[in-house]
Image (spheres, grey):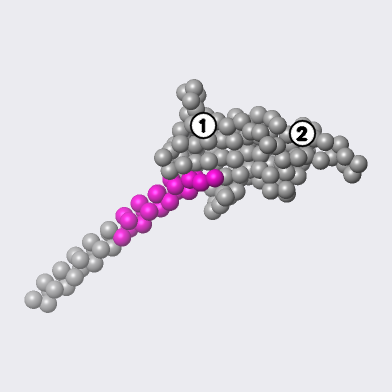
């Protein structure tokens, strides 16, 4: 009788431990696939100052200046229903000369692109309304997403460098 009780207890414990591992793995996969959902704003462009063009250096300075004023010119929105939108104000940046130096007001216009997307934890693939596909390598760490700028199809920000996005 004692052996039967030990055998039943062993089987029960084994079944419980197996189902727990499966639940944890499934939860991790769900967390990875949903990590991108939300609104992301570009806050920084990391470049190599030794090899970057003067234009790229200026774009980095403009992005830094506007971000410091809580003006975000590139915004990505990923929704749970696998739709996405990208808002880009880079084409509407104006630089004004003032008595104290240059000033860049926050643009009031932006170009918006709508698409659908898939995300596997490392790659976002978007398909726009024209059926064009864009594959973007991303790295997400908490509320920070790093994107290779050359993967993006964003005018004025598609040269070498890393665009850093923060989730809002």
Q: Is residue 45 left or right of residue 116?
A: right
Residue 141, x across and y down, in percent: 55, 51
Q: How many marks?
A: 2
Which residue of the protein is positioned furthest toward the top in this rendering? 130
The residue carrying mark 2 is 94
User: In which quadrant is the N terminus drawn?
Assistant: bottom left
Q: Is residue 107 above or below residue 18?
A: above
| Residue at the spot 61% in from the left edge and 44% down from the top edge | 41
In-front residue for pair 97/148:
97
The verdict on residue 28 being magenta is yes
> Would you call the spot at circle 1 few (<14 residues within 10 Å), some (14-19), or many (20 or more)?
some
In-front residue for pair 90/20:
90
| Residue at the spot 46% in from the left edge and 33% down from the top edge | 116
Residue 167, x across and y down, in percent: 57, 49
| Residue at the spot 57% in from the left edge and 45% down from the top edge | 40
Number of the label disc, if any, that sits on residue 152: none
**Magenta residues, as a range?**
20-39
> Would you call the spot at circle 2 few (<14 residues within 10 Å), some (14-19), or many (20 or more)?
few
Residue 53, x across and y down, in percent: 77, 32
Gap between marks 2 and 1, in whole Å? Answer: 25 Å
Which residue of the protein is positioned furthest toward the right in this rendering? 99
Q: Is residue 134 left or right of residue 99?
A: left
The verdict on residue 93 being magenta is no
Q: Is residue 51 visible?
A: no
Majority secondary structure in the magenta region = helix
The residue carrying mark 1 is 114
């Amino acid at each position: 009788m004692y052996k039967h009780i030990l055998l039943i207890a062993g089987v029960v414990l084994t079944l419980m431990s197996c189902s727990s591992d499966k639940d944890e793995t499934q939860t991790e996969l769900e967390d990875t696939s949903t990590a991108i959902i939300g609104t992301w704003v570009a806050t920084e462009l990391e470049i190599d100052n030794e090899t970057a063009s003067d234009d790229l250096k200026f774009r980095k300075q403009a992005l830094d200046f506007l971000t410091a004023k809580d003006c975000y010119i590139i915004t990505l929105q990923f929704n749970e229903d696998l739709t996405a939108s990208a808002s880009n104000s880079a084409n509407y940046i104006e630089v004004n000369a003032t008595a104290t130096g240059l000033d860049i007001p926050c643009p009031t216009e932006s170009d918006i692109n709508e698409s659908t997307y898939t995300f596997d934890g490392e790659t976002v693939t978007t398909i726009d309304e024209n059926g064009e596909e864009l594959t973007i390598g991303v790295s997400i760490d908490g509320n920070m997403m790093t994107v290779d700028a050359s993967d993006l199809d964003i005018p004025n920000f598609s040269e070498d460098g890393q665009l850093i996005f923060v989730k809002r």
